Image (cartoon, rainbow, N blue to C red):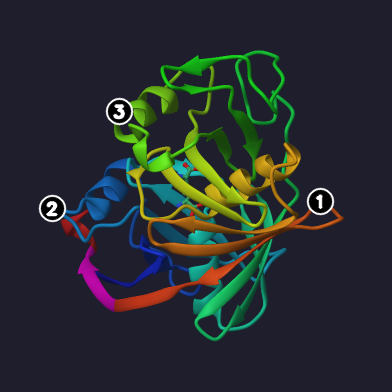
Amino acid sequence: MRVSFVKMHGLGNDFIVLDARETALPGVLDNAAVRALADRREGIGCDQLILLESDEAADCRMRIFNQDGGEVEACGNASRAVGLLLGKPARIATAGGIIETRPDGDACSVDMGVPRFGWDAIPLAYAMDTLTMPLGWEELEQPAAVNVGNPHVVFFVEDNDATRLDTLGPIIEQDELFPERVNVNVATVENRSTIRLRVWERGAGLTRACGTGACATAVAAMRRGLTEREVTVHLPGGPLTILWDEDERITMSGPATESFRGSFEWSDYA
Ligand SMILES: N[C@H](CCC[C@H](N)C(=O)O)C(=O)O
């Protein structure tokens, strides 16, 4: 049976979007099927695979699968892409909570909810201050940790372009301090309204952009008094605007793009 998909991206962080709201998939989308579809040599290729399902309490449910096949709680760039696909303001249920999208031309803003900072909410394996964690991995030390639906650790450095994120990213991602593993953010604060960010994503590696990483990094910088409450975060793929308002809610705004539409033979991948 052929299955249709929409290929989308947010600042180069790319997705295969499957819409199963009206018609269920012909089979189970298991870890192996996700890895096969996400593979950039043998499959269609993506950082994350997004599955839309109907939902009683929201306009739809968005399930998020990393390139390594693992299902996760949140994906900022995909939230904007799906917001654009839905074409009108929507409430989307995710494993990390309800998010609200508001498309505007080729951009979309997303209410990503309220971040959490407790060590057990990140989660960490044991209790510790999450604003300035008393530990490090070689030149990366004393990070902050934030949960924005998914877990993030944020390092602030003088020049994040000089950081060996391809080497240290996977080491930190898999460290036993993070029972759910972690997304690794390395940021340089350029001024009180501008941050440069590179991200090693849990289950996907180095990506061109990470929406939840931009949210987590902005909030960590604000908590440390490094920036104002609205900042532009410059990722390799482009900029996102992050606002952390007086109700503690995060709004992320930026572009999302539909690249092309296609279909595949389900039995080739599952
Ligand atoms: N790798 C992330 C999921 C995708 C996040 C990223 N693509 C974004 O835009 O937020 C995780 O395992 O939590």
Query: Who comes first in sequence, dot 3 or dot 1?
Result: 3
Query: Who comes first in sequence, dot 1 or dot 2?
Result: 2
In the image, 74 versus 127, the foreground residue is: 127
Q: Residue at x 34, y 56 (%)?
A: 27
Magenta portion: prevailing SS class = strand
Q: Percent x, y for residue 208?
A: 36, 55
Circle 3: is it few (<14), some (14-19), or many (20+) Cα within 10 Å? few
Disc ID at residue 41: 2
Q: Which residue is mark 3?
A: 167
Q: Percent x, y for residue 218?
A: 64, 48
Q: Quadrant of residue 10?
A: bottom left
For badge 2, the amino acid type reads: Arg
Q: Which residue is mark 1?
A: 248
Query: Who comes first in sequence, dot 3 or dot 2?
Result: 2
Q: Is residue 107 magenta?
A: no
Circle 2: is it few (<14), some (14-19), or many (20+) Cα within 10 Å? few
Report the quarter where the N terminus lies: bottom left
Residues drawn in magenta: 261-265
Q: Percent x, y for residue 61?
A: 58, 61
Label 3, label 2: how far apart the Cα atoms are: 23 Å
Q: Residue at x 35, y 28 (%)?
A: 170
Q: Residue at x 48, y 48 (%)?
A: 197
For badge 3, the amino acid type reads: Thr
Image side of residue 229 versus residue 165, left or right: right
Label 1, label 2: how far apart the Cα atoms are: 42 Å
Position of residue 73 relative to residue 85, above or below, is: above
Position of residue 173 relative to residue 194, above or below, is: above
